[in-house]
Image (tube, grey):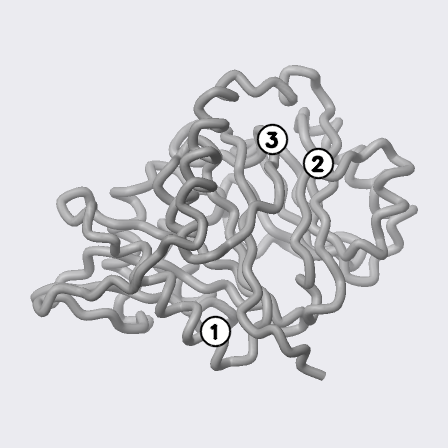
Amino acid sequence: MTAPLYSAADRMETIDGAFIQHGPASNRVYIMKSGKADLQTLLPRLLALAQSQGYTKIIAKIPVSRQSAFLEKGFAIEAEIPGFYNGKESALFPALFLHNTRKRMNDRPLQAKALRLAHARQHSGQETALAPHCRLRPCTPADAERMSGIYKTVFPSYPFPIHDPAYLVETMRAHVAYFAIETEGKLVALSSAEMEPESRSVEMTDFATLPPWRGQSFGSVLLAEMEKEMAAKGFQTAYTIARAVSPGMNITFAKKGYRFGGRLVNNTQISGQIESMNIWFKTLISKQVS
């Protein structure tokens, strides 16, 4: 077991060859990458970890070819992203609830409404032009302090430590491309593309617009730019994990042609509470890259 990468409440570490996030904030164990871990050894170990810490959910993102070990342990598939792994193999999200209260969706009507509104706007997106005084550009390490300030303003709490400038710089230098919209030298909106080169998949995430600047479709503009950049880099599948009760981001992705892949029930702590999250996915490059 390696030492955690960051000191956030939910920590990220490698256990038995799998990359794991766990902690009290989202009150879960999340297998982000199972790698080549022996699942017959890993899953009992993570179940013991969850029970010892009082976590109430275990969730994973895995190739479909690895699902049998999870199903044997009582996991149920909550979502799927077809073609996630190099356009050839689906990613599944198996989940195991360790307490019945974690399964209850008290905001089911709001979730249904948000999804209904999103589906009604499927493929209706049009290119949005920025006002002349606004500029879209990639972020650099020099932006990290200002970026963290925006994320602190928009998200009082978040599942990953985007409030920490050091985290932003480290991920920027490793596998995350951050983008910003600025006006008169001031950053007003952000997003990121979290790249996974080994699977040629990319998560479109970390969208944040300062309150005075909302309502100008900055999210759609940022998403369009990230799609163009990621397709040029050879990434085949784009996806996002959006708050299930929030019509805005669900509509943004549906309008751009993303398809609904399922819902992760009571999955992620964001802005002070654990929320259900919707999976949306899209093929950026239809031709498989060898």
Query: Residue drawn 56% across and 46% down?
Result: 260
Q: Amino acid at mark 1?
A: Met
- Which quadrant: the C terminus? bottom right
Amino acid type at mark 3:
Val
Tell me whether circle 3 and circle 2 mark residues in contact (CB < 8 Å). Answer: no
Q: Residues within 10 Å of mark 1 (few under 14, many from 20)?
A: many
Q: Residue 34, relative to residue 107: is it above or below?
A: below
Q: Quickly name the residue at label 3.
A: 265
**211 relative to 62 in the view: left or right:** left
Location of residue 114 (image quadrant): top left
Element at badge 1? helix
The residue type indicated by label 2 comes to Ile
How far separated are the C-alphas under marks 2 and 1?
Answer: 30 Å
Q: Residue at x 42, y 69 (%)?
A: 177
Residue 290 in the figure: left or right of residue 206? right
Which residue is identified by label 2? 58
Question: 10 Å neighbourhood of mark 2: few (<14), some, or many (≥20)?
Answer: many
